[in-house]
Image (cartoon, rainbow, N blue to C red):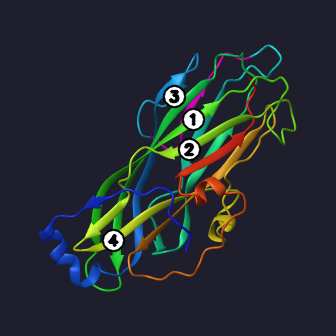
């Protein structure tokens, strides 16, 4: 079974848990009633513009456009999947699409990091009996950005001047729900090219995007129940840092310096 990369922990009150115990011990599926994103706390960068509150999609733009480019800022966007949506427990699914806009900006005007918060209302749907609401949950990530200069030496594999490097890590460990001794875990698995790739267990630890490109990946997740034995997920190639248990997803994307 693929090891979860990012996990959150949440505890449900004993009275509520007792009501759900007989039916929620083995949730058949999970429902996301809402899912929104927020970019916050950027570090570094110039001329930063971002959506001020939770939204879908949530965007952030930065940088002073270089005269050789298109006159646009660089930036990120997270576009959550439409809600409500229901997925069986242990299935891999997409939370949304993460896009990196790689534009030509002046050196020294790119950010070095920004935090991404995902806010979701989650409901457990058992095989029988009442649904169990887990309420509103916020999952927090740190996205680091290395705005590399467009001069040699470039990162290996760069195809159009020097590509930028992006990484994402969890800011805390609170993605598990405990109901009367039964653990329910939301695991953020990483980035895939497509939902089909995510379902096949194929995730990117790094990728490159050319100058003036738009690079989009699926942010994949799974919701599992302790004691279940889901089918083994194929391990993706090129994840030595993740498999070493560092909890780090490293992405390489191209942005101008």
**Disc 4 and disc 3: Cα gap in Å?**
36 Å
Category of crowding for the residue at label 3, using alpha-carbon neighbours closer than 10 angstroms: few (below 14), some (14–19), many (at least 20): some
Helix, strand or loop under label 2: strand
Category of crowding for the residue at label 2, using alpha-carbon neighbours closer than 10 angstroms: few (below 14), some (14–19), many (at least 20): many
- Find residue 144 and name its label: 1
Measured as percent of width and height from the top left, residue 74 is found at 67, 28
Above or below 36: residue 4? below
Category of crowding for the residue at label 4, using alpha-carbon neighbours closer than 10 angstroms: few (below 14), some (14–19), many (at least 20): some
Q: Which residue is mark 4?
A: 183
Q: Which residue is mark 2?
A: 168
The answer to whether the residues at label 1 and label 2 have Cβ atoms under 8 Å apart is: yes
**Disc 1 and disc 3: Cα gap in Å?**
16 Å
Above or below 58: residue 244? below
Measured as percent of width and height from the top left, residue 31 is found at 40, 67
Closer to us: mark 4 or mark 3? 4
Boundaries of the magenta span: 55-65
Sequence-first disc among 2 and 3: 3
Sequence-first disc among 1 and 2: 1
């Amino acid at each position: 079974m693929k090891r979860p990369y990012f996990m959150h922990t949440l505890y449900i009150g004993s009275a509520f848990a007792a009501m759900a115990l007989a039916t929620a011990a083995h949730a058949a599926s999970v429902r996301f009633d809402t899912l929104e994103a927020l970019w916050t706390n950027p570090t570094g960068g110039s001329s930063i513009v971002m959506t001020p509150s939770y939204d879908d999609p949530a965007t952030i733009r930065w940088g002073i456009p270089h005269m050789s480019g298109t006159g646009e800022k660089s930036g990120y966007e997270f576009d959550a999947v439409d809600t409500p949506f229901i997925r069986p427990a242990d299935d891999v699914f997409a939370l949304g699409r993460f896009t990196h806009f790689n534009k030509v900006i002046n050196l020294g005007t790119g950010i070095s990091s920004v935090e991404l918060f995902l806010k979701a209302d989650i409901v457990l749907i058992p095989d029988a009996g009442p649904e169990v609401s887990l309420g509103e949950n916020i999952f927090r990530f740190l996205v680091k950005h290395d705005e590399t200069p467009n001069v040699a030496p470039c990162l290996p594999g760069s195809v159009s001047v020097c590509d930028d490097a992006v990484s994402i890590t969890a800011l805390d460990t609170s993605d598990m729900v405990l109901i009367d001794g039964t653990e329910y875990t939301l695991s953020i698995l990483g980035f895939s090219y497509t939902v089909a790739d995510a379902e096949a267990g194929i995730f990117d630890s790094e990728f490159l995007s050319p100058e003036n490109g738009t690079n989009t990946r699926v942010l994949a997740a799974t919701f599992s129940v302790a004691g279940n034995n889901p089918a083994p997920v194929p391990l993706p190639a090129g994840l030595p840092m993740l498999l070493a248990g560092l909890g780090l997803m490293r992405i390489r994307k191209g942005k101008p310096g």
